[in-house]
Amino acid sequence: MSDYRLELRNVAKSFGEVQSLHNVNFEVGQNEVVGLLGDNGAGKSTLIKIVTGYHQPSSGEIYFNGQKAENLTVPQARALGVETVYQERALAEQQTLWRNIFLGRELTTRLGLLDVKRMRSETQKLMVESMGFTSSAVTPDSVIKNFSGGEKQGVAIVRALYFEADLIILDEPTMGLALSETRKLLTFVRQIKAAGKSAIFIDHNVFHVYEVADRVVVLDRGTVAGTFLTKDITLDELMEKMYQVAHTGSLD
Protein backbone atom coordinates (compact mmCIF):
# COMPACT_ATOMS: atom_id res chain seq x y z
CA MET A 1 0.00 0.00 0.00
CA SER A 2 1.31 3.43 -0.97
CA ASP A 3 1.80 6.08 1.69
CA TYR A 4 -0.43 8.29 -0.43
CA ARG A 5 -4.07 7.88 -1.30
CA LEU A 6 -3.61 10.43 -4.08
CA GLU A 7 -0.58 11.84 -5.87
CA LEU A 8 -0.36 14.43 -8.62
CA ARG A 9 3.10 14.52 -10.18
CA ASN A 10 4.09 17.54 -12.26
CA VAL A 11 0.50 18.10 -13.32
CA ALA A 12 -0.13 21.01 -15.68
CA LYS A 13 -3.36 22.17 -17.29
CA SER A 14 -3.94 24.77 -19.94
CA PHE A 15 -7.09 26.01 -21.61
CA GLY A 16 -5.94 27.43 -24.91
CA GLU A 17 -3.33 30.03 -24.06
CA VAL A 18 -4.36 30.18 -20.39
CA GLN A 19 -2.16 28.08 -18.12
CA SER A 20 -4.24 27.14 -15.04
CA LEU A 21 -1.79 24.75 -13.37
CA HIS A 22 2.01 24.72 -13.67
CA ASN A 23 3.72 21.40 -12.84
CA VAL A 24 1.85 20.90 -9.59
CA ASN A 25 2.94 18.21 -7.15
CA PHE A 26 0.19 17.45 -4.66
CA GLU A 27 -0.39 14.52 -2.33
CA VAL A 28 -3.01 13.29 0.11
CA GLY A 29 -1.85 10.68 2.59
CA GLN A 30 -3.73 7.68 3.86
CA ASN A 31 -6.07 8.98 6.59
CA GLU A 32 -5.07 12.62 6.11
CA VAL A 33 -7.11 15.81 5.85
CA VAL A 34 -5.41 18.28 3.51
CA GLY A 35 -6.55 21.88 3.42
CA LEU A 36 -6.36 23.53 -0.01
CA LEU A 37 -6.16 27.31 0.20
CA GLY A 38 -5.77 30.06 -2.35
CA ASP A 39 -7.47 33.12 -3.78
CA ASN A 40 -9.90 33.00 -6.70
CA GLY A 41 -7.96 32.03 -9.81
CA ALA A 42 -5.32 30.15 -7.83
CA GLY A 43 -6.17 26.89 -9.60
CA LYS A 44 -8.06 25.07 -6.83
CA SER A 45 -11.11 24.25 -8.96
CA THR A 46 -8.99 23.06 -11.87
CA LEU A 47 -6.95 20.80 -9.62
CA ILE A 48 -10.09 19.25 -8.13
CA LYS A 49 -11.67 18.73 -11.56
CA ILE A 50 -8.55 16.82 -12.60
CA VAL A 51 -8.70 14.64 -9.48
CA THR A 52 -12.39 13.89 -10.08
CA GLY A 53 -11.94 13.15 -13.79
CA TYR A 54 -13.78 16.18 -15.18
CA HIS A 55 -10.61 17.49 -16.81
CA GLN A 56 -7.65 15.66 -18.27
CA PRO A 57 -4.25 17.16 -17.37
CA SER A 58 -2.25 18.62 -20.24
CA SER A 59 0.78 16.86 -18.78
CA GLY A 60 1.79 15.05 -15.62
CA GLU A 61 0.65 11.90 -13.85
CA ILE A 62 -2.07 10.92 -11.37
CA TYR A 63 -1.75 8.04 -8.90
CA PHE A 64 -4.28 6.48 -6.54
CA ASN A 65 -2.78 4.24 -3.84
CA GLY A 66 0.40 4.02 -5.87
CA GLN A 67 -1.34 2.94 -9.08
CA LYS A 68 -1.17 5.24 -12.08
CA ALA A 69 -4.55 6.40 -13.40
CA GLU A 70 -4.58 6.80 -17.17
CA ASN A 71 -7.18 9.04 -18.86
CA LEU A 72 -9.16 9.38 -15.63
CA THR A 73 -12.91 9.85 -16.06
CA VAL A 74 -15.62 10.78 -13.55
CA PRO A 75 -16.94 7.18 -13.27
CA GLN A 76 -13.39 5.86 -12.87
CA ALA A 77 -12.59 8.39 -10.13
CA ARG A 78 -15.76 7.41 -8.31
CA ALA A 79 -14.87 3.72 -8.64
CA LEU A 80 -11.49 4.59 -7.10
CA GLY A 81 -13.29 5.99 -4.06
CA VAL A 82 -13.43 9.72 -4.85
CA GLU A 83 -16.58 11.56 -3.75
CA THR A 84 -17.21 15.31 -3.78
CA VAL A 85 -19.38 17.33 -1.42
CA TYR A 86 -20.13 20.58 -3.25
CA GLN A 87 -20.99 23.94 -1.73
CA GLU A 88 -24.30 23.77 -3.60
CA ARG A 89 -25.15 20.71 -1.49
CA ALA A 90 -26.22 18.52 -4.38
CA LEU A 91 -29.19 16.90 -2.68
CA ALA A 92 -32.74 16.30 -3.84
CA GLU A 93 -34.47 18.95 -1.73
CA GLN A 94 -37.98 17.58 -2.21
CA GLN A 95 -37.01 14.01 -1.37
CA THR A 96 -36.79 12.28 2.00
CA LEU A 97 -33.60 11.66 3.94
CA TRP A 98 -33.47 7.95 3.11
CA ARG A 99 -33.99 8.60 -0.59
CA ASN A 100 -31.13 11.11 -0.57
CA ILE A 101 -28.78 8.71 1.19
CA PHE A 102 -29.35 6.03 -1.45
CA LEU A 103 -29.97 8.29 -4.45
CA GLY A 104 -28.57 6.57 -7.53
CA ARG A 105 -27.33 3.60 -5.48
CA GLU A 106 -30.59 2.15 -4.20
CA LEU A 107 -30.56 -1.14 -2.32
CA THR A 108 -32.59 -3.91 -3.90
CA THR A 109 -34.00 -7.28 -2.92
CA ARG A 110 -32.97 -10.57 -4.50
CA LEU A 111 -35.86 -10.05 -6.92
CA GLY A 112 -34.45 -6.72 -8.03
CA LEU A 113 -37.13 -4.64 -6.28
CA LEU A 114 -36.34 -1.58 -4.19
CA ASP A 115 -35.62 -2.66 -0.62
CA VAL A 116 -37.33 0.33 1.02
CA LYS A 117 -37.46 -1.27 4.46
CA ARG A 118 -33.70 -1.88 4.52
CA MET A 119 -32.91 1.61 3.19
CA ARG A 120 -35.06 3.20 5.90
CA SER A 121 -33.44 0.98 8.53
CA GLU A 122 -29.92 1.81 7.35
CA THR A 123 -30.79 5.52 7.33
CA GLN A 124 -32.12 5.31 10.89
CA LYS A 125 -28.85 3.70 11.96
CA LEU A 126 -26.79 6.39 10.22
CA MET A 127 -28.91 9.13 11.83
CA VAL A 128 -28.06 7.89 15.31
CA GLU A 129 -24.47 6.73 14.82
CA SER A 130 -23.09 9.25 12.32
CA MET A 131 -25.32 12.28 11.89
CA GLY A 132 -26.12 13.04 15.50
CA PHE A 133 -29.87 13.30 14.91
CA THR A 134 -31.44 12.40 18.26
CA SER A 135 -34.70 14.33 18.04
CA SER A 136 -37.81 12.33 17.24
CA ALA A 137 -38.77 15.20 14.92
CA VAL A 138 -36.22 13.93 12.38
CA THR A 139 -36.90 10.54 10.80
CA PRO A 140 -35.73 8.72 7.65
CA ASP A 141 -38.89 10.10 6.02
CA SER A 142 -38.10 13.74 6.84
CA VAL A 143 -37.83 15.91 3.73
CA ILE A 144 -34.35 17.34 3.08
CA LYS A 145 -35.56 20.88 2.31
CA ASN A 146 -36.41 21.29 6.00
CA PHE A 147 -32.84 20.54 7.10
CA SER A 148 -30.35 23.26 8.01
CA GLY A 149 -27.34 23.98 5.82
CA GLY A 150 -24.94 22.15 8.13
CA GLU A 151 -27.24 19.16 8.35
CA LYS A 152 -27.45 18.95 4.56
CA GLN A 153 -23.67 18.98 4.29
CA GLY A 154 -23.55 16.29 6.96
CA VAL A 155 -25.96 14.12 4.97
CA ALA A 156 -23.72 14.40 1.90
CA ILE A 157 -20.59 13.49 3.90
CA VAL A 158 -22.23 10.57 5.70
CA ARG A 159 -23.58 9.30 2.36
CA ALA A 160 -20.04 9.31 0.96
CA LEU A 161 -18.71 7.43 3.99
CA TYR A 162 -21.54 4.89 3.84
CA PHE A 163 -20.60 4.00 0.29
CA GLU A 164 -16.97 3.65 1.39
CA ALA A 165 -15.45 6.66 -0.31
CA ASP A 166 -11.72 6.75 0.38
CA LEU A 167 -11.15 10.38 -0.58
CA ILE A 168 -13.86 12.95 0.12
CA ILE A 169 -13.45 16.37 -1.48
CA LEU A 170 -15.16 19.21 0.36
CA ASP A 171 -15.68 22.18 -1.96
CA GLU A 172 -16.27 25.33 0.11
CA PRO A 173 -18.54 23.41 2.51
CA THR A 174 -18.86 26.23 5.06
CA MET A 175 -20.07 28.83 2.58
CA GLY A 176 -23.32 30.39 3.77
CA LEU A 177 -23.35 28.51 7.07
CA ALA A 178 -23.94 30.14 10.44
CA LEU A 179 -21.33 29.66 13.17
CA SER A 180 -23.21 26.82 14.88
CA GLU A 181 -23.73 25.07 11.53
CA THR A 182 -20.06 25.48 10.67
CA ARG A 183 -19.15 23.75 13.93
CA LYS A 184 -21.37 20.82 12.95
CA LEU A 185 -19.73 20.66 9.55
CA LEU A 186 -16.23 20.61 11.07
CA THR A 187 -17.34 17.75 13.32
CA PHE A 188 -18.36 15.81 10.21
CA VAL A 189 -14.92 16.48 8.69
CA ARG A 190 -13.31 15.02 11.81
CA GLN A 191 -15.50 11.95 11.37
CA ILE A 192 -13.93 11.40 7.95
CA LYS A 193 -10.51 11.08 9.57
CA ALA A 194 -11.91 8.99 12.44
CA ALA A 195 -13.30 6.58 9.84
CA GLY A 196 -9.80 6.07 8.44
CA LYS A 197 -10.53 7.99 5.24
CA SER A 198 -8.92 11.05 3.65
CA ALA A 199 -10.22 14.46 2.63
CA ILE A 200 -9.33 17.56 0.66
CA PHE A 201 -10.90 20.56 2.37
CA ILE A 202 -11.17 23.59 0.06
CA ASP A 203 -12.17 26.85 1.71
CA HIS A 204 -11.47 30.56 1.64
CA ASN A 205 -11.59 30.65 5.43
CA VAL A 206 -8.18 29.73 6.83
CA PHE A 207 -9.66 29.48 10.36
CA HIS A 208 -11.94 26.59 9.38
CA VAL A 209 -9.26 24.74 7.43
CA TYR A 210 -6.62 25.10 10.15
CA GLU A 211 -8.95 23.65 12.76
CA VAL A 212 -9.35 20.26 11.05
CA ALA A 213 -6.50 19.87 8.53
CA ASP A 214 -3.34 17.85 9.14
CA ARG A 215 -1.59 19.74 6.37
CA VAL A 216 -2.30 22.89 4.38
CA VAL A 217 -1.33 23.44 0.74
CA VAL A 218 -1.40 27.00 -0.59
CA LEU A 219 -1.96 27.50 -4.32
CA ASP A 220 -1.14 30.74 -6.08
CA ARG A 221 -1.65 31.33 -9.81
CA GLY A 222 -1.46 27.66 -10.63
CA THR A 223 1.57 26.75 -8.57
CA VAL A 224 2.10 25.34 -5.08
CA ALA A 225 3.31 28.33 -3.08
CA GLY A 226 3.74 26.42 0.17
CA THR A 227 2.92 23.30 2.17
CA PHE A 228 2.60 23.38 5.96
CA LEU A 229 1.91 20.83 8.67
CA THR A 230 -0.60 22.44 11.02
CA LYS A 231 1.16 20.89 14.02
CA ASP A 232 4.30 22.83 13.09
CA ILE A 233 2.78 26.25 12.41
CA THR A 234 0.48 28.52 14.37
CA LEU A 235 -2.65 29.98 12.87
CA ASP A 236 -1.12 33.47 12.99
CA GLU A 237 1.99 32.24 11.19
CA LEU A 238 -0.12 30.54 8.52
CA MET A 239 -2.16 33.72 8.01
CA GLU A 240 1.06 35.68 7.60
CA LYS A 241 2.22 33.19 4.96
CA MET A 242 -1.10 33.56 3.14
CA TYR A 243 -0.79 37.34 3.26
CA GLN A 244 2.75 37.16 1.91
CA VAL A 245 1.67 34.94 -1.00
CA ALA A 246 -1.28 37.18 -1.83
CA HIS A 247 0.83 40.32 -1.97
CA THR A 248 4.17 39.10 -3.33
CA GLY A 249 3.30 35.83 -5.08
CA SER A 250 5.96 33.92 -3.18
CA LEU A 251 7.23 32.97 0.28
CA ASP A 252 10.78 34.21 -0.32
Image (cartoon, rainbow, N blue to C red):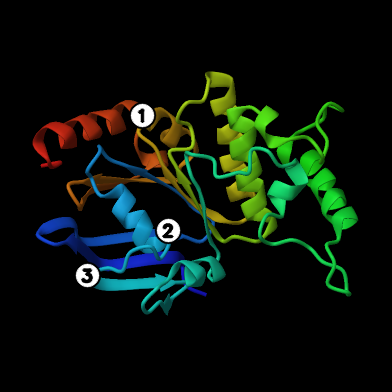
User: Which residue position is annotated with label 1?
Assistant: 235
The structure residue drawn at horizontal position 20% and vertical position 30%, both measured from the top left corner, is: 243
* Place of residue 111 in the rendered image (x, y in percent of width and height, measured from the top left): 88, 74
Viewer-side label of 2, 1? 2
User: Which residue position is annotated with label 3?
Assistant: 58
Q: Nearer the viewer, residue 206 or 100?
A: 100
Q: Is residue 183 above or below residue 203?
A: above
The structure residue drawn at horizontal position 58% and vertical position 29%, both measured from the top left corner, is: 149
* Place of residue 47 in the rendered image (x, y in percent of width and height, measured from the top left): 32, 56
Q: Secondary structure at mark 1?
A: helix
Q: Residues within 10 Å of mark 3 (few under 14, many from 20)?
A: some
Q: CA distance from mark 2 to mark 1?
A: 21 Å
Horizontal side of 250 relative to 183 (left or right) equals: left
* Residue lying at the far top of the rendered structure: 179
Earlier residue among tags 3 and 2: 2
Q: Secondary structure at mark 2?
A: strand
**Type of residue at label 2?**
Val
* Place of residue 46 in the rendered image (x, y in percent of width and height, measured from the top left): 30, 54
Q: Nearer the viewer, residue 143 or 18?
A: 143
Give the label on residue 28, or none: 2
